[in-house]
């Protein structure tokens, strides 16, 4: 359990030596070491992109490191809608929605989205990060508590830090552990909120909503689901985690972002009129930050139409995710039992993950490593993710490269390594392997159980560096 609330009026500890504030910057060597080794995988500048392929360092590569699940960034109608919105409203709102930046398009989006999600009301923020931070911090007062999954996204963690109430963590997707902490602590607080990602961003696990809902009811808690990676992906039309489990209305609040399937930027929180009205007048990240730009509002409104009118995008995504899950597991990768378009490949040590990512890049595949402390020491992953717009040729090319490199790095075709990784998976990502039983396109409420890890920013995802290579991915 971690107490929140820092007292800003408290005097500094006078026993500490005086030093330059920037000493820590001078001493920060982690990234420089990886750069010096020629393995730095971050901030690769994209010269152009079709969504599923990118040109970086002058070469075309298959993108398997993005969250553009439905591939809608390049949909003609979506691009047209963005342009139309600029014509009507200009390029920016130049103020917060609260004061002077509220567009008819924002309100239309809120109404349409609430309908799509089966909620009474919805509030659109400028980003998903601000949605989590703002909603959680204003809802959870000093006598309240947040029960937070250990693998929740950084923006949820940020919300729990700003909120005045306390935060109690439970092991990742482990409902027995959630019940244990509820039993031990629920009596100490007034209000309580259980918070979890619907689909976890690094591992692709699906949160065990059915069991969490039972516990929320039993212990008088509200339930908040972050559907950043579930919107557009889970459920018959991509409505998210509730729809996936055929449990519309199970969560009191559903949060999401437009920076993934909905091809833009912005975020939302959806729930009852009463709660959304409260957040609208209390969330500081909503009231004191400029509004989501017009082109984004136009984009997202159109995405919402497209996902309902053109089911082929979700169907393709499911087909591609199923193919990659099946083929990567068949090849012998430990994918932590993913059933979603986010498919982690368990690699082991950080250095190997960096070196593997670099080789992938050189061979025309853009993916992202996940190293400690985002994952436990020795449990580095390569996070791969797939899109509706990947062609079979793209995916086959990626599979070919992954098979070749997997063998070269001793990850495939090596029984001892396979067992070692299986043990790591069991010990550190443990019971999440049961997720293989929850199919991506099901709306059944299969049982899910899991374990922990911790997500944190710098060391997380996003890969890149130098380049070259052949086949259809070469420039
Ligand atoms: C689970 C989750 N929640 C929230 C966010 C924040 O969303 P945004 O990119 O809109 O700030 C992200 C983005 O990475 C995410 O993965």
Image (tube, grey):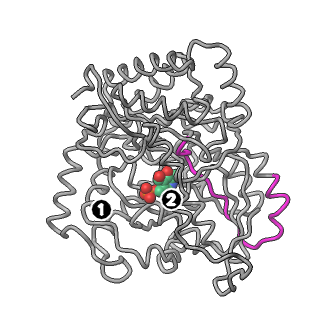
Residue 375 found in image quarter: top right
Percent coordinates x, y for residue 282 in the rendering: 52, 79
Could you tell me which residue is drawn at 59 percent across and 25 percent down? 334
Dot 2: within a 10 Å radius of its alpha carbon, few (fewer than 14), some, or many (20 or more) residues? many
Percent coordinates x, y for residue 86 in the rendering: 18, 64
For the C terminus, the quadrant is: top left
Q: Is residue 291 above or below residue 332?
A: below
* Residue 227 visible within the image: no
Q: Nearer the viewer, residue 430 or 454?
A: 454
User: Is residue 200 in the magenta section?
Assistant: yes
For the N terminus, the quadrant is: bottom right
Could you tell me which residue is drawn at 68 percent across and 76 percent down? 17
Percent coordinates x, y for residue 422 in the rendering: 68, 25
Q: Nearer the viewer, residue 371 or 223?
A: 371
Could you tell me which residue is drawn at 46 percent across and 34 percent down? 384
Residue 253 found in image quarter: bottom right
Q: Is residue 157 rendered to the left or right of residue 296?
A: right
* Residue indicated by mark 1: 297
Q: Is residue 37 above or below residue 201?
A: above
Q: What element carries label 1?
A: helix
* Residue indicated by mark 2: 255
Q: Give the range drawn in magenta.
A: 180-202
Q: In this view, does 383 lie above or below 268?
A: above
Residue 61 found in image quarter: top left
């Amino acid at each position: 359990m971690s107490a929140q609330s820092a007292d800003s009026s408290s005097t500094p500890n006078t026993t500490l030596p005086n030093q330059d504030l920037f000493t820590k910057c001078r001493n920060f060597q982690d990234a420089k070491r990886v750069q010096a080794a020629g393995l730095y995988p971050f901030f690769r500048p994209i010269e152009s992109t079709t969504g599923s392929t990118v040109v970086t360092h002058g070469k075309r590569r298959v993108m398997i490191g993005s969250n553009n699940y439905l591939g809608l960034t390049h949909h003609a109608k979506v691009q047209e809608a963005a342009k139309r919105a600029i014509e009507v409203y200009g390029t920016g709102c130049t103020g917060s929605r609260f004061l002077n930046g509220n567009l008819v398009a924002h309100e239309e989006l809120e109404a349409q989205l609430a309908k799509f999600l089966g909620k009474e009301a919805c509030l659109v923020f400028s980003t998903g990060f601000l949605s989590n931070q703002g909603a959680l911090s204003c809802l959870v007062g000093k006598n309240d508590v947040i029960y937070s999954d250990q693998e929740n996204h950084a923006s949820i963690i940020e919300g729990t830090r700003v909120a005045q109430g306390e935060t109690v963590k439970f092991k990742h997707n482990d409902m027995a552990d959630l019940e244990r902490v509820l039993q031990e602590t629920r009596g100490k607080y007034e209000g309580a909120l259980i918070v979890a990602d619907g689909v976890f961003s690094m591992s692709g696990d699906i949160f065990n909503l059915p069991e969490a809902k039972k516990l929320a009811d039993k212990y008088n808690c509200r339930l908040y689901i972050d559907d950043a990676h579930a919107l557009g992906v889970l459920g018959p039309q991509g409505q998210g985690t509730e729809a996936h489990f055929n449990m519309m209305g199970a969560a009191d609040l559903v949060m999401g972002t437009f920076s993934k399937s909905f091809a833009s930027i912005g975020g939302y929180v959806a729930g009852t009129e009463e709660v959304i009205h409260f957040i609208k007048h209390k969330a500081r990240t909503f009231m004191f930050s400029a509004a989501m730009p017009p082109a984004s509002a136009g984009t997202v409104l159109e995405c919402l139409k497209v996902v309902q009118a053109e089911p082929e995008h979700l169907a393709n995504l499911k087909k591609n995710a199923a193919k990659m899950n099946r083929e990567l597991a068949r090849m012998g990768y430990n994918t932590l039992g993913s059933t979603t378009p986010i498919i982690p490949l368990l690699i082991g040590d950080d250095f190997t993950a960096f070196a593997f990512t670099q080789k992938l890049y050189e061979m025309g595949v853009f993916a992202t490593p996940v190293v400690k402390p985002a994952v436990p020491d020795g449990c580095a992953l390569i996070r791969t993710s797939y899109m509706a717009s990947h062609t079979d040729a793209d995916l086959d090319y990626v599979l070919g490269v992954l098979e070749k490199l997997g063998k070269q790095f001793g990850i495939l075709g090596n029984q001892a390594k396979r067992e070692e990784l299986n043990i790591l998976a069991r010990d550190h990502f443990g019971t999440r392997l049961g997720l293989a039983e929850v199919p991506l396109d099901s709306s059944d409420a299969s049982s899910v159980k899991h374990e922990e890890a911790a997500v944190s920013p710098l060391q997380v995802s996003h890969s890149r560096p130098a380049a070259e290579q052949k086949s259809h991915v070469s420039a």
